[in-house]
Image: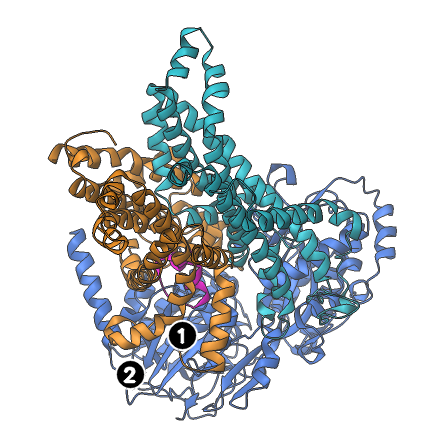
Amino acid sequence: MFRKKAIASALLLGLAFALPAQAQSVLRVKGDGDIKQLDALFTTSYPTRDMAYLIFDTLFSVDANYKPQPQMVDKWSVSDDRKTYTFTLRPGLKFHDGAPVTSADVVASIDRWLQRDSMGMEIAKRRDSLTAVDASTFRLVLKEPFDRVIEGFGRMTAYPLFVMPARLAKTPPTEEIREFVGSGPFKLAASEWIPGVQLVLTKNADYVPRSEPPSALAGGKIAKVDRIERITFRDDMSAVNALLAGEIDYVSSVPPELLPVLQADPDIQWAKAPILGKNFQVIINHTQPPFNDVRMRQALQYLVNQQDMMTAIFGNRKDLYEICGALFMCGGPYATDIGSERFLNPSVDKAKELIKAAGYDGTPIVYLHPMDGKIQRDAGTILVAAMRKAGIVVEDVQMDTATMFTRRTNKGSPKEGGWNVFMTGFAGDALMDPLTNPFMTGACEKAWIGWPCDTEMQKLWQDFLLAGNDAQRREIAIKLQAKANEIVTYIPIGQYNDISAWRKNVSGMVPGPILTLWNVQKTR
Amino acid sequence: MKRGYSFPMVFGGTVIAATLLCALLAPMILGYSDDIVMTRSMRAPGAEYWFGTDNLGRDIFVRTLSGARNSVIVGIGVAGLTLLIGTAFGLLAGYFNRLDGAIMRMMDGLMAIPGVLLAIALAAILGSGLYTVVIAIAAPEIPRTARLVRSVVLTIREMPFVAAAISVGSSTPKILLRHILPNAMPALMVQATFVCASAILTEAVLSFLGVGTSPDIPSWGNVMAGGRQFFRVAPWVILFPGIFLSIFVLAINLFGDALRERGDPMLSGRRA
Amino acid sequence: MARFLLWRLLSTVPVMLTVLVVIFLLLHLGPGDPAATLAGDNATPEQIASIRARLHLDQPLIVQFAIYLRQVLSFDLGVSVFSNRPVTTLILQRAEPTLMLATTTTLLSVIVAVPAGIYAAKRVGRFGDYVVMGLSAIAFSVPVFVLGYLLMQSFAISLRWLPVQGYRPLSAGLMACLTSLTLPTLALTCLFAALVARITRATMLDVLAQDYIRTARAKGAGRFRILIVHALKNIGVPVVTVVGTSFAALLGGVVVTESVFNIPGAGRLTVEAILTRDYPVVQGVMLVFAVILVGVNLLVDLSYTLFDPRIRHGGAR
């Protein structure tokens, strides 16, 4: 049995490699990180989600203004009492296995998503019924009005609503799907997928794009290359060298220190991406001393020097980052500096005053410091140095990311394997909205790691969820940020963009929150 | 070979002595000023910063010299630990027939895992302190030393002077330490130089893969690994520690070779 | 002969068991497990817990080991926690580049280093010996990733003679494959050839000092004749030993080289699996590596018995 399997896979592999690549346009891309699995309802990993957008289609998608626009949906309407939503699918949608997309498939996909996504759960709480009316029409009836249904169906974080055949969508969300059949503009070449090495997509010739021009994730998605090879690199230098040598066409994020090398080459074009930028955050454990004292947390705000951290990562390239006080991202719809004075004006002296006022007794604090990611490594080194300067005794626990992922979920004291401070990175598209920003719930035990606990924030979050119009939402978001900064749910270390670079024979990139490879073409 | 001091031995010895001196004195001379100073990041080598600075504005000259200290600690630490544990296992396995099978099968098992992979796994799992890295690199080296000592013990055990020692009632530990161990020493010293050199290189490899010592414990390896992204724009970050590392490892290798030549009875017998 | 073989085969059982236990304990006792990495940044603790349960990570260690042992004994290495692919498939997918790189490096090293080692042994204590030993010491002292970058910079980027990175499989043609392997092979050969040259020289000195060479010399055979006919015949076995015993070192070098040159081999698979705690993959690859190493050692031992009758007849050595 073992032997047979072995021979079969060896044969398969041989076949895969033997596929001719001539006369086809092949886009070779170095994506961010490795794709280890493709079920975007099972993991929240960004690379997985980004790739899933190419394979699966969505009911709605956000445009460049982060407004949901219909994608698979042709027409939709909501009843006057705001409780009944009726949707009609676009004609001609087909899954990669040839089967037409029916409303039964959609209903099953929505069902799986409702159990997993936080907005989905809010909808599920209010659901009266979700039914397929006919092959292309489905209807959602709510028990009470809830105005975020369309936004939820189109959201891209934490779990987007990807549509897949009902037979796959029936998999419980706690288990991964094993077969990746979508209806998006590209198909997965499953036999050529080697986790950790490459993932290959081929053009879906049957895809019927929308007629609107593309805008971020919305609009017409046209597969203009026959084949996309997403190649995983362990070493950024090798990726940049490969781009210079023309062995790959596109690098989604180039380390900023290698930018001069790319700029010197006339065949290379680069741009900042994604549009809203990214952020790393200092997270504090609210449950453990000494940081259960708000003054200690505020002292830490004084110690996060965005300028230093950004210089460490970007050197003198001031065009690549911005010092930003907005917890909901500078440039986002809820941007404000309210309550951010402390980390916008870092001061070791003021931190010392707060630390003294809090009566800090010199107990060592545990900083979780991953060494295998450059930003976390260098910015962490700067933060640890600043904390020490302010008189905090830091146990700088250096580890790899996998250890950090596990250890940070430990709610115990540092002596029991817990922790006090660490850094993580969420993308701007998650942070920009109070509902997707994981640090805004104030939900104590149920909050995201760090477990900030605040009844006022809990109330504000609910208010925001139910707020009807943009003005109200903005007003509540500002209050939320003020409160979050006061109790210090997280401290941003500066907003930046990745640098995407590509060879000049590649064109048609759609600016957006993620790497979208539809509409991209390659000339010889 | 010649009883005098050959070039490799003199060269190796001098470089090793100089590096050890640097390693010991570096903190005193320099007062540890490899602080992060963002205003001076990425300076090219010059009068002010002899070896330039890195992206965090740390002085590469200072980091190279204090790197000497930590790299030497790794090298000597690994060699020492390997020798200590390997010798203990080797002596036990070689002298006590009953323990031999169990110990040697265990050593075979450890040896069957590629050393670098085992070191990577250990370093990733134990964390990236200086001593955990020493343990991670030493563990895969132990079996070889144990084997070496065991083979020496097996040969010497049968020799008349050991039998004599037993007959006059010397205790087992005394026989092992007084009579057998000294005879294994020359071979062990050569082995130690080899382990020391390869440990320093392995540490660099671990740093390269992101599981070595942390950047605030500078070693030649991790200063280089930290600077490899800047290879094309700031080659000095990787160049200077690289040169120091290579010369030091070269010195140890040459010194070890010279030791081996001097101690090799087969060789000296032939030339005599 | 058959008894010897059987005995050697049986003696690998405890060795493999040790490997299994060591790797298993190392992974499971260490901090960090795959569940949190698998779930991603946004996942809730409940979601992580459900993944832990699905992977049996919430069971007692001894139960987990029993499950694993039973699996291995039925020739099943399990399934990757992340990609859900059988570990056997993953290894097979990654085997070709690693094997090819190991083969080209071994060949080149033997071609360069064995003559160099013999030459050094012949000129022992003289200038030629110093040159060979010095060069090998230098090659031995440069970290392989530095060498890799230097080669890449000069031959691939400045001169554009060779590809910068990546691997072309054999099915894309032998030339394409070898071209893609040229730089990594060169980088790794520097390290490996230094090792082989050293061992060859030491072995050669050993052989030259043996009685039958003295006899031959006493009988007035020419130096060249002694070297080729008598010594080389006997050096065949030691060279096999050299290659066999430094095989582990080679595998170690391959890991780093694969990362520098972005070669999708088994070494990179292992490093990635270690960093993400993909337990089944780490255990599987380590086990396969161990089987290969033990197998190579077994072959080396066998080659002794074939060439050296003393062992075959149970004599001491």
Which mark is on residue A21? 2
Q: Considering the whole magenta stretch, tell me its main secondary structure.
A: helix
Is residue C264 on the magenta stretch?
yes
Q: Earlier in the sequence, mark 1 or mark 2?
A: 2
Residue B106 visible here: yes
Residue indicated by mark 1:
A230
Residue B255 shown left or right of residue C60 in the figure = right
- The mark lying in front, picked from 1 and 2, is 2
**Image: magenta residue range:** C253-269
Q: What amino acid type should be assigned to the residue bearing mark 1?
A: Arg
Q: Which chain is cyan?
A: B
Q: Nearer the viewer, residue B91 or B70?
A: B91
Chain assignment, label 1: A
SS at mark 1 in the image: strand
Q: Is residue A205 above or below residue A303?
A: below
User: Does the stretch in magenta take in A195?
Assistant: no
Which chain wears orange? C
Q: Is residue A500 above or below residue C9?
A: below
Q: Residues within 10 Å of mark 2 (few under 14, many from 20)?
A: few
Query: Against A113, is A274 above or below?
Result: below
Query: Looking at this view, is B205 or C73 the one in front?
Result: B205
Please state the horizontal and vertical placement of residue B17, each as a whole percent of the image.
Answer: 65, 46
Residue at 71% x, 44% y is B24
